[in-house]
Image (cartoon, helix red, strand yellow):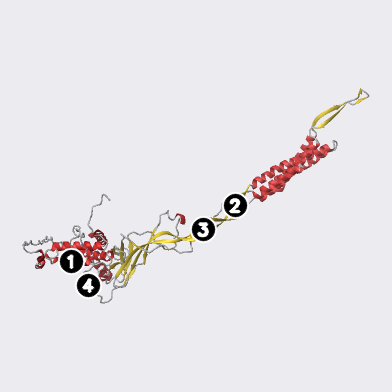
């Protein structure tokens, strides 16, 4: 009973191990699908947009730069993820090894137990039967071994091992049954006198022991068969699927498009370049490889107007002009399908990227001049472009040969006489109020060249050596550039205030006054009061004007400044 219970327990254990086993593999994580979620807007990036347009008002383009915060929807809540994986079963070879070991041990136990049991059943015919049966079985096994030498197969190898081992174990059991054990001597007493004595000899291993060995060997053979079945079945791979639910997770919503978080903000202290390309030129200045460049410095929240009428009339034979906008600072190109690299929970801790968008990317086209069109009235404003360069480009467009002109030697410039205001004596008996009735100043007392009448703090800068006679760098051009920037800053910063027009009228009136310096000082004082009422300071207006003039000044006209050694 004990042996049977042990075998049952062993079989249950083997079956349990065989049904569970070990696996080796990795799970492939699936895509998280929201089950129930709430939507939130997260700021993901900044987009700088440069807009170029031509409203059709006669070759005048508009430039506008703005910065917009872009947001994307994030989902918060429960998500479900389905993972798949292919796993390999482990331990099949161990089961096969256990089957082989238990099979050998069980076969040997059955052979020894049966051989000894049969040999001890009858002392006369038992041993011959045991030896004959064991020898026959062993001979069959040897025959299978010899046959497998010439042509091997799994069946011959199996018979070779099983029959040879079983026959040898039967012979071993028969031999063990003949081993002598202990001997006993008995002397029966008959009528008080001693009789003849007899001796009985027993075997070393008795019959019940051989029976136990045979039964135990049979049990091991059963275990070998069971483990062999498990080892054969526990092989190959298995596909598994699992579902993982997450209670708190966040991910980007691909179904909702990206949108602007708030209204666009005007770019501050940024500039751009207008690249002008003529359609009739394949190479050289004015072509795709060397476009004409006009620098633009947006000032204020509105659009920046750039008048290209004079440039258009300077190139009548070049066909249509294509104008493209190129910002000085360009970030990666804007694209609509953008997804952040970090999850929504970490978007606040990461650096927000910046992208650049130019609208339209291909630029705008200025159509050719109409027949009989006249240039605008007034002084030509070429935005720092040389008139000689524009003439050479127009000749190249019309197919005329290039004219190489030798520079003429410049005569030495005579120093300009500086007029001095005559000092008139003032009679102490005459009241100050009557001075306003004095006759107007003579011609030499008018506004001098060194005093252009600009706002306080704005002065004409010194020109580099050799640029005094350059029309694009002269003092008149510099004065015109500063005057235009003053009106532009007055319109954008003062929001339509009349401070600058009032100051201009006051300065013009002061030129014909008897006490010109006193009247000029009064004009500057009124200018400061007007700025204060508008909520501005003179330094803010001066910085705006200087930045606008510096951005629109050609490179060859800039004053060479020493590098700063300290911030």
Q: Is the residue marked by circle 4 packed among few (<14), some (14-19), or many (20+) residues within 10 Å?
A: few
Observer-nearest of 291 and 133: 291
- Is the residue 89 above or below the residue 59 in the image? above
Q: Give percent across and percent down for residue 158.
A: 71, 46
The extreme right residue here reads: 191
Q: CA distance from mark 1 to mark 2?
A: 93 Å
Residue 148 as seen in the image, left or right of residue 525: right
Q: On the rendered image, what quadrant is the N terminus found in? A: top right
Q: Which residue in the protein does label 4 denote?
A: 377
Dot placed on the residue nearer the N-terminal end, 3 or 1: 3
Q: Give percent across and percent down for residue 120.
A: 82, 37
Q: Which residue in the protein does label 1 denote?
A: 506
Asked if disc 3 and disc 1 are in contact, CB closer than 8 Å, the reply is no
Q: Quadrant of residue 107?
A: top right
Q: Which residue in the protein does label 3 denote?
A: 77
- SS state under label 2: strand
Residue 166 visible in the current orientation? no
Q: CA distance from mark 3 to mark 1?
A: 69 Å
Q: Is the residue marked by circle 2 packed among few (<14), some (14-19), or many (20+) residues within 10 Å?
A: some
Q: Is the residue marked by circle 3 packed among few (<14), some (14-19), or many (20+) residues within 10 Å?
A: some
For the point 60% across and 51% down, the residue is 88
Observer-nearest of 277 and 335: 335
């Amino acid at each position: 009973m004990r042996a049977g219970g042990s075998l049952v327990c062993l079989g249950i254990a083997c079956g349990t191990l065989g049904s569970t086993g070990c696996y080796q593999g990795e799970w492939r994580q699936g895509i998280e699908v929201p089950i129930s979620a709430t939507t939130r807007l997260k700021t993901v990036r900044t987009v700088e947009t440069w807009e170029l347009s031509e409203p059709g008002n006669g070759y005048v383009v508009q430039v506008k730069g703005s910065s917009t915060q872009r947001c994307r929807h994030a989902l918060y809540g429960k998500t479900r993820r389905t993972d798949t994986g292919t796993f390999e079963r482990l331990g099949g070879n161990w089961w096969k090894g256990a089957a082989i070991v238990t099979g050998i041990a069980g076969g040997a136990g059955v052979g020894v137990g049966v051989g000894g049991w049969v040999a001890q059943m009858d002392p006369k015919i038992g041993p011959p039967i045991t030896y004959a049966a064991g020898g026959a079985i062993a001979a069959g096994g040897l025959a299978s071994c010899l046959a497998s030498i010439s042509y091997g197969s799994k069946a011959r190898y199996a018979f070779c091992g099983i029959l040879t081992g079983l026959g040898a174990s039967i012979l071993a059991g028969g031999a063990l049954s003949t081993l002598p054990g202990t001997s006993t001597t008995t002397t029966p007493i008959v009528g008080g006198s001693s009789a003849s004595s007899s001796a009985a000899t027993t075997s070393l291993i008795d019959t019940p022991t051989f029976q136990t060995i045979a039964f135990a060997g049979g049990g091991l053979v059963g275990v070998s068969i069971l483990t062999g079945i498990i080892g054969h079945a526990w092989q190959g791979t298995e596909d598994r699927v699992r579902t993982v639910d997450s209670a708190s997770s966040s991910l980007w919503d691909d179904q909702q498009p990206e949108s602007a978080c708030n209204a666009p903000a005007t770019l501050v202290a940024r500039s751009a370049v207008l690249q002008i390309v003529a359609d009739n030129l394949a190479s050289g200045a004015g072509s795709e490889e060397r476009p004409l460049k006009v620098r633009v410095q947006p000032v204020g929240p509105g659009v920046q107007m750039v008048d290209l009428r004079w440039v258009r009339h300077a190139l009548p034979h070049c066909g249509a002009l294509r104008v493209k906008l190129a910002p000085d600072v360009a970030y990666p190109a804007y694209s609509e399908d953008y997804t952040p690299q970090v999850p929504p929970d970490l978007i606040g801790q990461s650096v927000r990227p910046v992208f650049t968008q130019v609208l339209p990317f291909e630029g705008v086209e200025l159509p050719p001049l109409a027949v009989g069109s006249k240039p605008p009235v007034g002084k030509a404003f070429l935005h720092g472009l040389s008139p000689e360069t524009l003439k050479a480009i127009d000749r190249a467009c019309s197919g005329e040969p290039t004219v190489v002109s030798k520079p003429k030697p410049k005569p030495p410039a005579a120093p300009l006489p500086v007029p001095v205001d005559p000092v008139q004596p003032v009679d102490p008996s005459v009241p100050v109020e009557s001075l306003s009735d004095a006759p107007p100043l003579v011609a030499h007392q008018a506004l001098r060249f060194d005093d252009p009448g600009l706002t306080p703090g704005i002065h004409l800068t010194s020109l580099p050596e050799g640029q005094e006679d350059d029309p694009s760098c002269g003092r008149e051009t510099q004065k015109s550039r500063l005057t235009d920037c003053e009106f532009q800053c007055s319109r954008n910063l003062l929001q339509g205030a009349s401070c600058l027009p009032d100051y201009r009228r006051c300065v013009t009136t002061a030129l014909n006054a008897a006490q010109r310096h006193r009247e000029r000082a009064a004009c500057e004082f009124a200018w400061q009061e007007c700025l204060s009422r508008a909520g501005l300071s003179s330094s803010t207006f001066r910085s705006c004007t200087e930045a606008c003039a510096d951005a629109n000044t050609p490179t060859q006209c800039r004053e060479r400044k020493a590098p700063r050694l300290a911030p």
